[in-house]
Image (cartoon, rainbow, N blue to C red):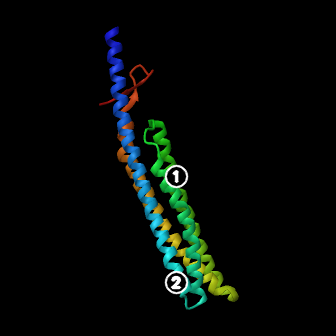
Amino acid sequence: MGRNIKIWVLFLTSYSFISNAQLNEYNERRHDLDQKLMIGLGSWATLNVIGSSIGWSNAPNDEIQSFHQMNIIWNTVNLGLAIPGYIRARRGKSDLTLSETLDEQRKTETVFLFNAGLDLAYISSGLILRSESKSDLDKSSLYRGYGNSLLVQGGFLLVFDWIAYGIHSSRSKKGLQPIIEKIELSDSGFGLKYKF
């Protein structure tokens, strides 16, 4: 009986060490990926704010001025999302349980999918503004400029969010799925066993 308990304790200790090490590494890489994604979003936003500030001041007409104005507004918001997102990813905990890791992974994928849906709404709004520019001649330049900006910014974000979702989803299938597949109910049904 004493020998069985020692074997069981050894098994639990080695299982815990292996799974914790794998999960820690997985979570560290997820945080690294999120940092890189936020640097990408922040770089896009910074370049747009700088470029559109110059463009706005040198715009030859109201439509182009409106385009650059919306780019500045839009990318100020993007910077407001990218900077805290980067800080959150940099400070993210890596020593999570399997359940916590799965929950964080689900949240991350859901955020990028939800954002992709919003991006389609932004693109649609851009198309609506461009359409409205034909019927409201007083605001035609404003609507066309804002509409074109929404098409560019929404298009970029749609590609960004789909790529981010795809990378995270792929990593989950390659990194978490093998860990999950090694865990199954014990033969008695009262515990779990881990296949080495």
Label number found at residue 132: none
Quadrant of the rendering where the C terminus is positioned: top left
Marks 2 and 1 sit apart, C-alpha to C-alpha, by: 36 Å
Q: Nearer the viewer, residue 172 or 187?
A: 172
Q: Nearer the viewer, residue 74 or 4?
A: 74
| Image spot of residue 60 (x, y percent) | 55, 91
Mark 2 closeness class: few <14, some 14–19, many ≥20 residues within 10 Å: some
| Image spot of residue 152 (x, y percent) | 51, 75
Q: SS at mark 1? A: helix
Q: Nearer the viewer, residue 105 or 182?
A: 105
Mark 1 closeness class: few <14, some 14–19, many ≥20 residues within 10 Å: few
Name the mark nearer the viewer: 2 or 1.
2
| Mark 2 residue type | Gly
For the point 47% across and 48% down, the residue is 91
Q: Nearer the viewer, residue 162 or 43?
A: 43
Q: Which residue position is annotated with label 2? A: 55
Compared to residue 18, the image places residue 59 above or below, namely: below
Q: SS at mark 2? A: helix
As drawn, is 50 to the left or to the right of 32?
right
As drawn, is 33 to the left or to the right of 146?
left
Label number found at residue 110: 1
| Image spot of residue 183 (x, y percent) | 38, 32
| Image spot of residue 59 (x, y percent) | 55, 88
| Mark 1 residue type | Thr
For the point 46% across and 73% down, the residue is 47
Instruction: Residue lying at the far top in this picture: please name it.
Output: 1
Compared to residue 10, the image places residue 149 above or below, namely: below
